[in-house]
Image (cartoon, rainbow, N blue to C red):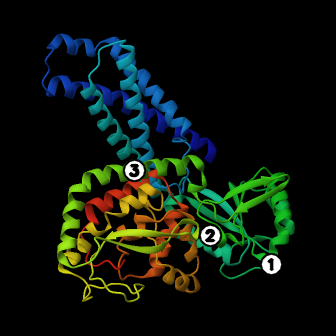
Amino acid sequence: MLKRNQRYLNFLNALIELVIFFLSYILATHIRFNVIHNPFGNVYVNNVWGTYYIQAALAYAVCMLVVYYFFNMYNRVRTSSVYKEISLVIILNGFSIVFLTAFLYFTRITDFSRLTLSIFYIISTTTIIVKRLTTRKLLGFFRKKGYNLKHVVVVGNGELAKQYVDTLKNNSHYGFKVYGFVANEEKENFKPHLCTYDKFSHWLEKRNIDNVIIALDADNSHYYETIIHACEKNGIRASIIPFFHKHFPAHPTIDVIGKTKLINIRSTPLDDFVKASVKRIFDVIGSLTLIIFTSPIMLIAAIGVKLSSPGPIFYKQERVGRGKKTFNMYKFRSMKVNNKDDTAWSTTTDDRRTKFGSFIRKTSIDEFPQFWNVLKGDMSLIGPRPEIPHYVDKFKEEIPMYMLKHLVRPGITGLAQVNGYRGDTSIEKRIEYDIWYIENWNFKLDLGILYKTVFGGFLNAEKIK
């Protein structure tokens, strides 16, 4: 019943979006030629409202549904991210409009208005986003009331099972209801108790269950085969929460060597050659562009540094980069020259700073020479901030997973920095953000961090690098 109802919901969802695409074109045409100035008069308007254009709009709407289908936009996952769904709508609609514009331009099969297509994109994208957000809210409301639920059986009654059940309780809009627990012994907080592991297959034969979640602790891992066999025998979907899952990255990958399957516990998106190439190309183009556009500022900064105190214009310091290899990171010198140990962090009250140095640090201008580090390949525009070898040796002994930040190129700015963890802040929180960034990298994330850096990160209360 649930699967049949879900198919109806998916069909209705697609049908509504078909209507949205179609009506968005009608409205965009009306705005372009009736609300905005129409240089062609009523003749062109009548032509646009003709049968040919109406059919074309309907055909485009159908094509968009096909695109959405191939990108699993109608195969709704209850636990999917709303951010990812909205981002995908914006991207798919945008690429489709670009493709349509290019197609109409090069084929010349008909006249078209680029402004109409732009208005159509804005209306259709906005409407579909609002519709999908509303659908999520409605489904969440009904699921909290007990409708459109998926019934799951949890195998196990240890810490893994507790974590999973707590997650479902805290996210009731997911629409999962725990039917009960399978374990060899009953426990107070894991009720109702359904049966023991050995009797699970017989119990499943007489029940209509949507999913089985296998959350066996290490002590009961020898029951895996029994439980999986029971699920396969009764045609029930099963998912496993490994008792060692805390060692997994956000998106683990599996390699197959012969009949042996290897789980990579430290794989990252940037291990992929294409993704790494996209990021590197962006770094090269971005750093070159920034070097050109900031060159007047850097020239003024160089003069200011030279006039503020005797010594070199640039300050270079050894930092640890990708693969634990060291490199020289460049900055405009902001302090007076001295021969003391430079492993100490600077503070706002550091008397070594010059007045001009304080200004370029506050405005992040002192970081501009690092664009050359990016161009050379030592660094990336976005990534974990590089550290001095002295502190790397110190932190790797004190902070778990600290060295994982060296799986990627260090950056001029990063996720931790745009979330307020820069300067004299918790190194543990910075590493937490760095690891999340490394394991969940995508190009949109880099663009978002870059945007936040440009519009919110140039003026800093304090920087300690």
- For residue 164, the mark is 2
Q: Quadrant of residue 75?
A: top right
Residue 158 position, x and y percent, is: 71, 78
- Left or right: 61, with 183 as reference point: left
Q: Residue 56, relative to residue 232: is it above or below?
A: above
Separation (CA) of disc 1 from disc 3: 43 Å
- For the point 14% across and 20% down, the residue is 38
Residue kind at label 2, given as amino acid type: Tyr
- Left or right: 413, with 62 as reference point: left
- Between 150 and 168, the one lying in front of the other is 168
Residue kind at label 3, given as amino acid type: Leu
- For the point 30% across and 85% down, the residue is 347
Q: Are marks 1 and 3 in contact (CB under 8 Å)?
A: no
| Residue beneath disc 1 | 219
- For residue 239, the mark is none
Q: Quadrant of residue 104?
A: top left
Residue 176 position, x and y percent, is: 59, 60
- For residue 133, the mark is 3
Label 1 element class = helix
- Between 428 and 410, the one lying in front of the other is 410
The mark nearer the N terminus, 2 or 1, is 2
Label 3 element class = helix
- Left or right: 50, with 45 as reference point: right
Residue 237 position, x and y percent, is: 72, 53
Residue 329 position, x and y percent, is: 41, 69
Q: Residue 382, relative to residue 333: is it above or below?
A: above
Is residue 145 at least partly visible in the picture?
no
The mark nearer the N terminus, 1 or 3, is 3
- For the point 87% across and 68% down, the residue is 198
Crowdedness of circle 3 by 10 Å Cα count: few (<14), some, many (20+)? some
The mark nearer the N terminus, 3 or 2, is 3
Separation (CA) of disc 2 from disc 1: 18 Å
